[in-house]
Image: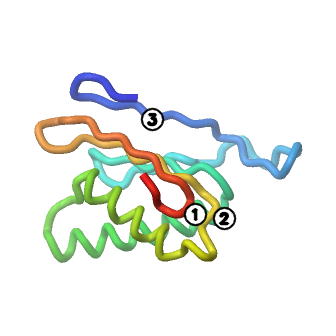
Amino acid sequence: MVGKNCFAIASDRRLGVQLQTIATDFQRISKIHDRLFLGLSGLATDAQTLYQRLVFRHKLYQLREERDMKPETFANLVSAILYEKRFGPYFCQPVIAGLGDEDKPFICTMDSIGAK
């Protein structure tokens, strides 16, 4: 959810297989940088793989541009990566929340093939 110059993102921490609980400390929300967070719901292995690819691409962006990614740019990156795998998609739905220019809140969610 978003408010005036702020945002909030929350999730559960349960990792399960059908009705069986495997763990209660699984991390679904990740910090990309100080003003950008990523939430990944869905298949745990796909969420971890997608997160690793996104962190790698963000670090490349930091090296090339010498600054952090804006939330809008990161949302476009996530959408492009998901769309690349549209015929064998990652089974996860990302939620991107962050603060853009002048502390303007940004929130975006996508389906498994990158449609915002």
Q: Going 28% across and 29% down the picture, which residue do you hit? A: 6
Labelled disc at residue 23: none
Residue furthest top in the image: 4
Left or right: 19, with 85 as reference point: right
Kind of residue at disc 3? Ile
Is the residue 71 above or below the residue 84 in the image? above
Image quadrant assignment for residue 25: top right
Question: Relative to residue 88, is residue 72 depicted above or below?
Answer: above
Q: Label 1 to label 3, Cα distance in Å? A: 18 Å
**Residue at point 22%, 54% (across, down):** 70
Label pair 1/2, CB-CB below 8 angstroms: yes
The amino acid marked with disc number 2 is: Thr
Q: Which residue is mark 1?
A: 48
- Checking the image for residue 45, the label placed there is 2
Please tell me the numbered disc located at residue 9: 3
Q: Is residue 58 left or right of residue 12?
A: left
